[in-house]
Image (cartoon, rainbow, N blue to C red):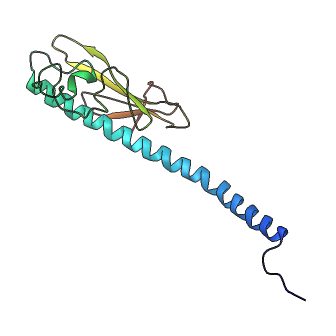
Amino acid sequence: MRKTRGFSLIELLIVVAIILTLAALAVPNLMRSKISAAEASAVHSLRTINTAQVTYAVAYPGIGYADNLTKLKFPAPGQPVSANAAGLIDWVLGCDNQPCLKSGYQFAVVNATGSPVLGYEVTGVPQVVGQTGRRGFCSNQVPKVTYDPNGGTNCTERLQ
């Protein structure tokens, strides 16, 4: 009589069940890691925008701070740097129309006040609250970063 080698159907089902259990445990941790990375990127982007705003205000004192992200972006190829395209932030944050999407967050300069612009606020909110981020972030010319635990722009908590 010949012996057959291989796995029985029960053994294969047990292995598949173990793999599915491990995957079910790993997916929530992966999502938490992804959200944490997106939030860290958002805070870094706010700080980058604040630095660009200070540079813009020094370069164009008659204008003050930029009243939208488009003014901080790089100019089109072959075009010189100007007050409308200062070349201070990358093409992702300096998109053509606000809000600019980066790493699951939407960024915009809002509440620009004065002429020249002496004050502004920059916001970064999750594109989908709970999936791309949990908290919304805000900053201004001070520059301090605050957050809204509900993912909006009602930033009352100071980021530590």
Q: Residue at x 80, y 71 (%)?
A: 11
Observer able to see residue 154: yes
Quadrant where the C terminus sits is top left
Expressed as whole percent of the image width and height from the top left, the position of residue 24 reads 67, 54
Task: Kindly indicate the quadrant of the structure image that contains residue 21.
Answer: bottom right
- Residue at 42% from the left image edge and 28% from the top image edge: 155
Q: How many marks?
A: 0
Task: Give the image quarter of residue 79.
Answer: top left
In this image, 154 relative to 56: left or right?
right
Question: In the current view of this chain or complex, which residue is farthest to the bottom?
Answer: 1
Q: Residue furthest top?
A: 115
Residue 77 appears in which quarter of the rendering? top left
Pick the residue in front: 80 or 104: 80
Residue 160 visible in the picture = no
| Residue at point 21%, 35% (across, down) | 51
Give residue 135's position: percent from left, percent from top: 48, 35
Q: Position of residue 158 (x, y in %)?
A: 39, 36
Q: Residue 130: percent from the left, percent from the top?
A: 56, 36
**Relative side of 53 to 59, left or right:** right
